[in-house]
C-alpha cells in the first residue's frame, strides 16, 4: 500500500465571503459552513469560532479534534464507513490542511472531556494549542440522551473536517511525503537483514461513551486484525470516546499517529516496519483473553521480531496492556509498551493498575495526576463550569478569579500514549 500525503501549510484562519485557501490563509464562509454541517434534529444550535496559537482563549469541554483531509487519488474517501462509503483506503494520494484543527465543544456529554488553552502553562501541555482551530460549538436539544448527544456532535465534527478538507483537493501541496508498506512476503524479501517490527495499536472500547470506530464499526465488535499503516492516515479509525482528555486519542491523533510516523522514518534503515495490528480494550475478562490471545498469535504468525504496544486510557485497560505484553513476549517477540501513569499527585503510587516482569521496556507519557494551575483566559468558548466535574478536576477546581487548579488529566493530549505531546524527562 503506497500513499502520497500532500501537506498544505496554513498560516492563519479567518472568516470571509468565500470558503477558500489563498496565500496560505484558510478563509471560511461561516453561513455556508453552518448550512453544510447543520440539520441534525438532536442539535438546537451550532456556531463557529476561530482561535489561534497565543490567543488568550480556553476551549472547554473539548470532545474531539480532527484534521481536514481529502482523497485526491485512490480508492474510497476520508473517514470510510462514517462519511465516505465503505472502501479500503490508504493508497493513492491524500491532501491535508496542516496546522488546522476542527475542535468540537458544547454542553458536556460525559465527565471525561478536556481543556485546550491557546496560551499560558496549559498550552505547553497540549499539542493542539499549536493549531489554528476552527471551533464547532454544538448545543443539544433539552433532554437528549448521552449516546445520541455524543453521536450527533461526533458526526458534525467529521462533516466540518470534510467540508474544509475538500478545499485541499486541487491545491498544490507545499510538501509531499510518501509512505509505503508492501505485502509481507515482498517486504521480507526486500529487507531480509532488518528486524521485522510491528505496531500493536490498542483502541479504547470500554463502552459507556468510551468508543472507537474502525471503518464505521464499533471496535468493541472486532477481533484483532492487521491494517496497513496508511489506512490510519485516511481516517479509517476515528474517535467516539470521552475517556480522560490527557490520554485519549482524538481523531487527529489517529490520522497523525506518532508511532507510525517514527516507524516509517526508520523503515528500510534500521527496521522493517511490517504493519499495524489493531486490538480493543473491552471490559470483560473473556474479551480481554480473546483479544490478547489473537494479538500474540498475529505477532507470531507475521514472524515479527519486535513490537511497540500503545495503550489508550488507564485503569481497566492497563490489564489489556500487560496481557498483550506478556503473551507477545511469550511468543518470543520483544515488546516495548507506551503508556502514561496515574501515580498520585505526589508520584508515589503504583503507576499502572497491572504489572508484570516482562513489561521491562516502557515509555511513559507522564503522570496524569500532576497538578497544574491554569490562569484565567480573556475568553472562554464552551462551558467553563464543568472544570469542577471533568476527570482531573474536583469541586473548587474553578476558582472565583476564573483560573483552574486541576490535574493535567484535564488537558487534551497532555500525556498522550502515542507520544503525540511535549512532556519529557531529563537527567541532571
Image (cartoon, rainbow, N blue to C red):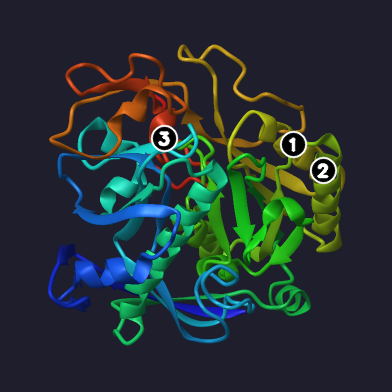
Q: CA distance from mark 1 to mark 3?
A: 31 Å
Residue 283 numbered mark, or none: 1
Mark 2 vs mark 3, foreground winner is 2
Q: What is the x, y in percent for residue 129? A: 28, 46
Q: Does residue 4 appear in this view? A: yes
Residue underneath mark 3: 424
Q: In which quadrant of the rendered image does the N terminus lie?
A: bottom right
Q: CA distance from mark 2 to mark 1?
A: 7 Å
- Where residue 58 sits, quadrant-wise, is top left
Mark 1 vs mark 3, foreground winner is 1
Classify mark 1: helix, strand or loop. Answer: loop
Contact between marks 2 and 1 (CB within 8 A): the answer is yes
Name the residue rendered at 60%, 52% in the picture. Answer: 212
Give the mark nearest the N terminus, 2 or 3.
Answer: 2
Give the mark nearest the N terminus, 1 or 3.
Answer: 1
Q: Does residue 372 appear in this view? A: no
Residue underneath mark 2: 287
Decide which of 394, 295 is in the foreground and name it.
394
Decide which of 135, 202 is in the foreground and name it.
135
Amino acid at each position: 500500500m503506497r500513499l502520497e500525503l500532500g501537506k498544505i501549510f496554513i498560516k492563519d484562519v479567518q472568516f470571509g465571503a468565500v470558503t477558500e485557501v489563498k496565500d496560505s490563509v484558510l478563509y471560511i464562509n461561516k453561513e455556508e459552513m453552518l448550512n453544510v454541517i447543520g440539520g441534525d434534529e438532536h442539535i438546537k444550535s451550532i456556531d463557529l469560532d476561530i482561535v489561534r496559537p497565543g490567543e488568550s482563549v480556553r476551549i472547554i469541554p473539548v470532545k474531539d479534534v480532527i484534521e481536514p483531509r481529502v482523497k485526491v487519488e485512490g480508492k474510497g474517501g476520508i473517514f470510510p464507513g462514517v462519511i465516505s462509503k465503505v472502501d479500503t483506503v490508504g493508497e493513492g494520494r491524500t491532501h491535508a490542511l496542516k496546522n488546522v484543527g476542527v475542535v468540537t465543544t458544547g454542553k458536556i456529554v460525559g465527565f471525561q472531556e478536556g481543556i485546550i488553552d491557546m496560551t499560558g502553562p496549559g498550552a505547553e501541555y497540549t499539542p493542539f494549542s499549536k493549531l489554528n482551530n476552527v471551533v464547532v460549538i454544538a448545543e443539544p436539544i433539552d433532554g437528549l440522551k448521552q449516546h445520541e448527544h455524543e453521536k450527533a456532535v461526533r458526526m458534525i465534527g467529521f462533516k466540518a473536517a470534510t467540508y474544509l478538507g475538500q478545499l485541499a483537493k486541487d491545491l498544490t501541496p507545499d510538501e509531499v511525503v510518501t509512505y509505503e508498506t508492501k505485502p509481507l512476503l515482498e517486504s521480507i524479501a526486500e529487507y531480509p537483514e532488518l528486524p521485522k517490527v510491528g505496531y500493536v495499536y490498542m483502541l479504547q472500547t470500554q463502552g459507556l461513551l468510551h468508543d472507537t470506530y474502525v471503518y464505521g464499526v464499533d471496535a468493541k465488535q472486532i477481533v484483532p486484525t492487521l491494517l496497513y499503516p496508511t489506512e490510519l492516515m485516511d481516517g479509517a479509525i476515528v474517535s467516539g470516546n470521552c475517556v480522560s482528555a490527557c490520554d485519549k486519542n482524538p481523531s487527529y491523533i489517529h490520522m497523525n499517529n506518532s508511532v507510525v510516523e517514527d516507524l516509517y522514518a526508520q523503515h528500510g534503515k534500521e527496521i522493517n516496519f511490517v504493519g499495524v495490528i489493531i486490538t480493543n480494550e473491552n471490559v470483560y475478562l473473556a474479551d480481554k483473553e480473546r483479544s490478547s490471545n489473537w494479538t500474540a498469535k498475529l505477532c507470531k504468525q507475521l514472524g515479527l521480531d519486535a513490537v511497540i504496544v500503545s495503550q489508550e486510557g488507564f485503569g481497566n485497560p492497563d490489564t489489556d496492556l500487560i496481557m498483550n505484553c506478556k503473551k507477545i513476549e511469550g511468543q518470543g517477540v520483544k515488546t516495548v509498551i507506551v503508556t502514561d501513569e496515574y501515580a498520585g499527585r505526589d508520584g508515589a503510587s503504583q503507576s499502572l493498575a497491572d504489572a508484570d516482569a516482562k513489561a521491562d521496556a516502557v515509555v511513559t507519557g507522564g503522570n496524569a495526576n500532576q497538578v497544574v494551575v491554569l490562569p484565567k483566559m480573556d475568553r472562554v468558548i464552551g462551558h467553563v463550569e464543568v472544570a469542577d466535574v471533568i476527570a482531573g478536576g474536583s469541586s473548587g477546581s474553578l476558582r472565583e478569579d476564573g483560573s483552574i487548579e486541576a490535574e493535567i488529566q484535564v488537558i487534551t493530549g497532555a500525556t498522550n500514549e502515542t507520544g503525540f505531546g511535549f512532556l519529557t524527562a531529563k537527567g541532571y
